[in-house]
Image (cartoon, rainbow, N blue to C red):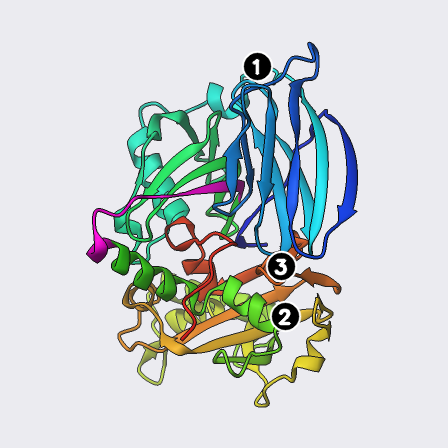
Amino acid sequence: MCMNRLHYRSINLVFFFLLTATASAQVNKISGIITDADSGEPIPFANVFFASTSIGISSDIEGKFVLQNFPNGKYDFTVAYVGYEPFQQAFEFNGSEFRLTIKLKTEEVKLREVIIKADTNGWAQNFDTFKRNFLGETQNSSKCTILNPRDIHLYFDRQARVLVAHASKPIVIENKALGYTIQWYLQKFELNYAEGTLQIFGFPSFQHLTPKGNAEAKRWTRERERAYYGSVTHFIRSLGKESLTEEKFRVRKFYRVPNLKRPSDEFLNQKINYFRNRAMNGEKILIGKTDSLRYYMELRNEPKLADSVATEDLKLKEIMTNTSEVNYVGMLKVDFLGEREEVNYAKSQGRTTIKQQTSVMHFLVPGLKIYENGYYQNAYDVFFEWYWAWSEKISDMLPYDYSPTIK
């Protein structure tokens, strides 16, 4: 299963917290204190943020923090501090207030297998592969820089054909295309060539870069809008607002059916063995103008399943139970008609013509919860193919609290 969506998953933690909630009609607020689980001493200057947003702050000298006046939605509230295991908990806000007391546990020092086996000789080549798959290959990726590359430990298993990465510190990315510094707390990176899958798990924190002037500020505004429109976040928000057509999305059912042009493996293997033996005896038999052995070998390379798409657009009620829950199971073909796909993507697919952005979205189970800021849960129940699988990488990632200029 290919999970190109960048997921946010909390790791196993040992923590204690007291939680009280009060409702407010106007203000979203979360506050509290962070202490050491063993000593009870406050932890000053811990990073407190909502993952995948620019909403964050540091705890004060007494370990206290307050976040407030942010948009409604669901967020992964996160506390991270060097030497401690991170705390992460999802909260839904709709004029809500939460008060937390968090006790962080000291992180155990473990030499993980990936660090022990890290390829030092092949690091540069492995890092180039990691960077290409982590940052992406969109036009924005060339303007992204990983500022602490040597904090990333890489290992390529040649026998299994798997590249894995580990970072004991957050990976710091400077994105000069969109105007952000991103701290990415990596939990898993696995590129499996044998299975054709890429899994990236972690949680990012965004900070705004300061533009050098009005020209750069306007360019960032323009590029953020370009990255947003047609993105997964844009699509999820459009579902919740029941505005797919207005937002220029076209959604149809998508299937993979047996490829009628491809005979069975048993038949093909018999033909290949037969003509291979004839070829070894110096014989050459043609089918039309094509060598028979080559003809059947090429036929065996054809996919067993063929793509099939419904002609009729799906109605929203066929996808959604209500404005906050997707009840569809299966595959959807999603076309964004408001913008043509990137030239880089067309080249990566071996195409010369530029078409609309087309993606396939897999819903593995019913009941996917969606929220007005674009958050969806459980992220593991969804994965993508085609354009979104290629484009939804760090270089084009926007925080959940981003909203485009209303036109």
Indicate whether 334 appears above or below 36: below
Three-letter amino acid code at the position of disc 2: Gly
- Say left or right for 252 vs 223: right
Task: For marks 2 and 3, give the one nearer the viewer.
Answer: 2
The residue tagged 1 is: 109
Residue 342's disc number? none
Task: For marks 2 and 1, give the one nearer the viewer.
Answer: 2
Three-letter amino acid code at the position of disc 3: Val
Alpha-carbon neighbours of circle 3 within 10 Å: few (<14), some, or many (≥20)?
many
Q: Is mark 1 on a helix, strand or loop?
A: loop
- Magenta-drawn stretch contains 185: no
C-alpha gap between disc 2 and disc 3? 17 Å
Along the line of sight, the residue nearer the viewer: 191 or 320: 320
Indicate whether 186 appears above or below 287: above
The residue tagged 2 is: 240
Q: Position of residue 57 (x, y in %)?
A: 51, 35
Q: Residue at x 47, y 46 (%)?
A: 54
Alpha-carbon neighbours of circle 2 within 10 Å: few (<14), some, or many (≥20)?
many
Q: Position of residue 2 (x, y in %)?
A: 55, 54
Instruction: State which region is magenta.
Output: 201-216
Q: What element carries label 2?
A: helix
Q: Is mark 3 on a helix, strand or loop?
A: strand
Residue 382's disc number? 3
Image quadrant of residue 321?
Answer: bottom right
- Magenta-drawn stretch contains 214: yes
Q: Earlier in the sequence, mark 2 or mark 3?
A: 2
Q: Where is residue 380 in the image (x, y as percent from the top left)?
A: 64, 52
Along the line of sight, the residue nearer the viewer: 2 or 272: 2
C-alpha gap between disc 2 and disc 1? 43 Å
